Structure formats: structure tokens, C-alpha cells
Image (cartoon, coloured by chain):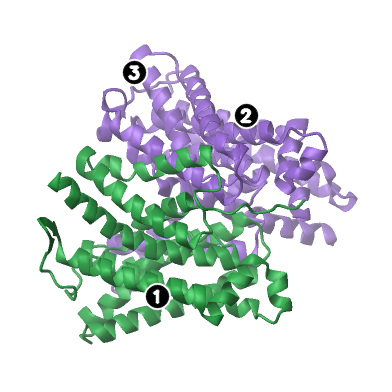
Chain colours: A purple, B green
Amino acid sequence: MADSIDIAAGKTTQLVPGRQWAYWQVAGWIALIIALVALPATASGYVLFMATLVAINVIATVGLNITVGYAGLLSIGHSAFIGVGAYASALMAIHLGTPLLLNVMVGSAAAFLVGLVFGAPSLRIKGVFLAIATLAAQYSLYFVFQQWTPVTGGDRGLSVPQVDILGMGDKGFYLLVVAVAVVLCIASRNLFRTRIGRAFIAVRERDYAAQVLGIDVVRTKLLAFGLGAAYAGVAGGLMGAFLRIVNPDQFTLLASVFFLAAVVVGGQASLLGSLLGATFMTLMPEMLRATMEVLGPPLGATDVAGFLSPLREVIFGAMIVGFLYFEPRGLAGLVERVRALATRS
Amino acid sequence: MLQFLEYSMIGVASGGIYVLAALGFVIIYKSTNVFNFAIGEMMMIGAYLFYAATGQLHLGWPIGILAALGGSMALAAGIERGLLQPLIGQPTIVLVMVTFGVGSILRGLAGMIWGPDIIQMPDFLPRKPIFIGDVLIPGKLAWGFIAVGTLSLAFILYYRLSRTGIAIRATSADQMTAESVGINVRRVSSLSWAITGLLTGAAGIVVGSLNGLTPTLGLVALNVLAVVMLAGMTSVGGVVVAGLFIGWFETLIGAYLGGAWQSFMPYLVVLVMMTVKPNGLFGEQRVERI
């Protein structure tokens, strides 16, 4: 795991030949932010929709990466925590009519607390046992979403009132989501330069050894769990307000596996990895659909839609297996390789 | 009361399927420490292979069963050889995610080959219901339970008594020592995957002939995971008890409280279990080293 610590320690420990690369890196981030802010001016409604979705998924993936990538706690219930945030935030909007940012914060706090409750088993169990506890969280919360009809609206869900930010409609919402995503990304990046964040990594590497170093393992694990859930809550609150509907089917086991896949494909314990992974996994089905629409008819495939969803599953699985097999550091690892090539010459 | 007995019998009978699949899970976990999330998809592939042999190639059901079980054994051994052996020594999360990935690939492939619609399996289990006193048990379920029970029993005997079974148990107790007394640990690992292929394939055929065949047939395996957790991951005897219990409990819940409770209850039991006794009912305390 030595190399993953290196990634986790991040860009502060650049080697001297990489100095120039560091400048490029900063320039790259600035260019990305400018591009993101400038996007609404030129983009169509569809592009804007996908961009907003990507930004929301980035928030959720960054959160899951804190739990799974940095703290090494396998969570298979991430989408349930997203659901907690979405429902809490939607209920605030419907019954109290409070502003979006407040709702999202409350959603995040709710998800944090629920995350702590289901993280509690991690005090005594670890590894795959914990994974099952999170699976139990997934099922229990889904059950609550579906069955507590007076509050959650059952299968039909809740419809969320429209939010208009600065009178800019979809563009305003997009900018808000991007701003939140940027703030949360920077927060998670800085977290791993603090004592708490370093403790996550120490616990992941060897929890007994971390304990010897004076880290409170139990508190650290719980916090890592809760923080991941809190990020999920933010993503959920934004997602509800964005899609304007919250129903149980958005928060299934498959959605949880989707975010796990985003973490693995992007790169564990890497901010860049979360960004790349979430972007890639969100856009992959769209790219696949576009490709099939072009390639399908000439190849004689008439039932493109029926063929597409199993094909997506195959590619989805193949991506996970392929990355674990060939590049366990994910897309971020590929970027690292490019960096190594660039700085060597 | 009569109804309660009837539901109980049906529940225990469907619990038998959980037992079979859970045995497959436990043997892989014991001998290779891999938490296999693809177990449901392995069941599903077994069922589809049976359908392909009997329904599509018209080979008759005895040959169909042999072909399906052989196919799923080969598939399982292939997964182990091709994907998991090269990853030995990687962190748990990597191994878990690989089985997730494999599951997704298998589900997708089944969807691409056989389509998303529900397929009725060729009948080979007698339909005629069986009466015990006044209690009626659907024929397919009863015969399925008998098949599954026989296979489970055969496996447990094999595991307890045969030379290979002892080698598997030795490996799960201590890999180093097992290797030093001349057990081929790699072979044991491949073998246990192949056995799992056999058990899950058989479980899949029974599930498929009871409920019909879809690419999402593997979802029943999520209850198998609950069974395994309840039993404590490593106990063969515990799995039998826990499997029958979960099957019984789940059916009763489904019958009296409705279907929505059914998928959730096993996990509630597990969650309570985990806070009370994290190693499960019959689990062994594993020693962790720094």
C-alpha cells in the first residue's frame, strides 16, 4: 500500500523534477474551474443537465472515497445515505419552505447521524463484516423510504418544489452545484493534511498500529463513516432539488455499487480519482448509448435499447475487474503514469 | 394453526436452497478468504445453462443437469484461476470488488444471450403436491428441497470425511502449515471454487424451476449473505441452522406482514446479531496480528 500513501499525501511531496508539473497542475485546475463556470453560456440544456448530474455524483463519490479509499472501510450502503439527505432536504423544502442551502445542510447532518448509527457496528467488526452491516443499512433505509408512506410518500415518493437561484433557472442551479462541489473537494483535499485525515490513513494501513500511535481508532472509524455519509447527504439534497423528485428507486443497492465502482475506476484515496471516476461513470452510459445508436443499425441490431442495459452491465463489471487487475490506482493512476513520463524527460 | 404449519414447511423448504448456496459461499471464504458477492450470479448461470441444455438443445433433464453443473463448475474454477489467483494478497476491498465486477459481467452476459424476460424452465420436478397429515406442500418445492437436502448432506459428508475435504479444512485452518505438510494450496483453492460452482449451480436450477428464470435470479443470494452472516461466515453446521431459520422466518414474515417486509427482515436479524455477537452464532474468533 506504500504507493497509495504517496497518492494520499498528495501533491505536497512533489519531487524536484516535478516542479514544472506542479505549475501545470495548478494551471489545469484553474482552467477546469474557468471552463466549468463558462459552460452555461454556451452549452445546450442536455449538456447542462449532464454536467449538473456529474457534479452531484462527484460530491457523493468524494464522500465515499473518504470512507472507502482513505479510511479503508468498505461501505455498500452509500446510496441509502444519499437517500437520507434527499428525503430530509425535500421534507424541509416541502413543509417549511426553507432555502435550498439550509435544506442541504440539514440533509447532510441527517445523513451524518444515520451514518454514525450504522457505522456503530464498525466498533467491533471490520472488513467484510462491516460491508454486510452497510448492506443491512442499505436494506433497512430502503425499507423505511418505501414503507413510511405518510412521510416519504411510499413508492411514488415526494415531488420537490422548484428552486430558482438568482433568477437564473437551470444555469443558476448548475453554478450552485459546481460551487458546492468545488468547496467540498477542496475541503476533502485539505482534510488529509490535518491530524484527523492522517489518522484515517493510519487506521486503514493497520488499525492496531494506529492505536499504538495514540489514535482513537473507534472514533476515527466512526468519523470516517459519518463524513462519507455527510457528503452523500449533500449530494442527495442537491439531487432531490435538481430532479425535483425523490423516490425509493433512486437509492437501491445498484446505485451504491455504482458509486463504489466510481471510486475503484477513478482511483482510491485520490481526489483526482473521485473526479475522474464520477465523471466517467456518469457519462459512460450516455457514451455507450450514442455509440450503439451509430453502430447498432449497420450491424443489424434492431433492439438497441433492449441490448443496451445488459451490455452496460458487462462493461460496468469489466471496468471494475480490469482496473483492479491492471491499474489498481484507477484513472488517477493512469494520470500518474503520464506524469512520470512527462517529468522524466 | 394449520396455515402456520403450512407456511413453516414452505419456509423451511425454501431455506434449504439458502443452505446449499451458503455452503458454497462458506467453503470459498474458508479456504481462500474471498468474500464472494457473485454467488447469486453463479446460481443464475447454472440455471440458464440447464435451460440451454434442456429447453434449447432438448437433451433431456438428466443430461441437462450434468451439463449445467459441469458448466458452472468449470466457470467457477475459471474465475478463480483467471481472476482471483493473480490477486492473492491484495486488500479485502479489491477481492470484494472483483466479485462484484464478475457478478455484473455474468448478469449482463445472461441478459445479452437470453434476454431480460422471464423464462419458464422445463418441468422436471413433479408438480403433484405432497401431504403430511393435512399440511400441503407444493410438489416442486418438496422435491426441490429433497434434492437440495441430499446434495447438502453429501457435501457435508465429503467435507468431513474425504481426504480432499480434510485438505480444504487444513488449508482454512492454517495455510502455511497446510503447505508444509504437502497440501497443494492452489489446487485446494481451485477445487473449492469448483465445488462452490457445483453447489450454487444446483441451487440455481432449483430456484429457477420454482420461480422462473431471469437475469436477476441472483438477487435471492442477498438473503444467502444474510444467512452466512448470521451463521458466522466460517461454520458449515451453523449455515445449515441459519439457512433453515432465515428461510422459515422470511416466509412467515412475508405471509403475515407482506412482501415488503420479507426482503428486509433477514437483514434486521443480522444487524441485531452483529451488535450483540459480531462473530455470528457459530463463528470462530479469528486472531488478528499487527
SS for tag 1?
Answer: helix
The residue beneath circle 3 is A94
Residue for badge 2: A183
Residue A43 visible in image = no
- Tell which subunit mark 3 falls on: A
Residue A298 pos. (x, y %): 32, 72
Say above or below: B118 vs A245. Answer: below
Q: Chain of mark 2?
A: A
Q: Secondary structure at mark 2?
A: helix
Q: Is residue B182 above or below residue B254?
A: below
The answer as to whether the residues below labels 2 and 1 share one chain is no
Q: Quadrant of residue A83?
A: top left
Helix, strand or loop under label 3: helix
Counting residues from the N terminus, which is met first, the one under dot 2 or under dot 3? 3
Residue denoted by label 1: B154
Q: Amino acid at mark 1?
A: Ala
Three-letter code, disc 3: Ile
Front disc: 3 or 1: 1
Q: In terms of depth relative to the viewer, which is nearer, A150 or A25?
A: A150
Eye-nearest disc, 2 or 3:
3
**Chain of the residue displaying label 1:** B
Within 10 angstroms of label 2, few (less than 14), some, or many (20 or more) residues?
A: few
Q: Identify which residue is drawn at 58% across, 47% down.
A: A74
- Residue A335 spot, x, y in % from top left: 69, 55
Q: Give the residue type that dot 2 points to.
A: Val
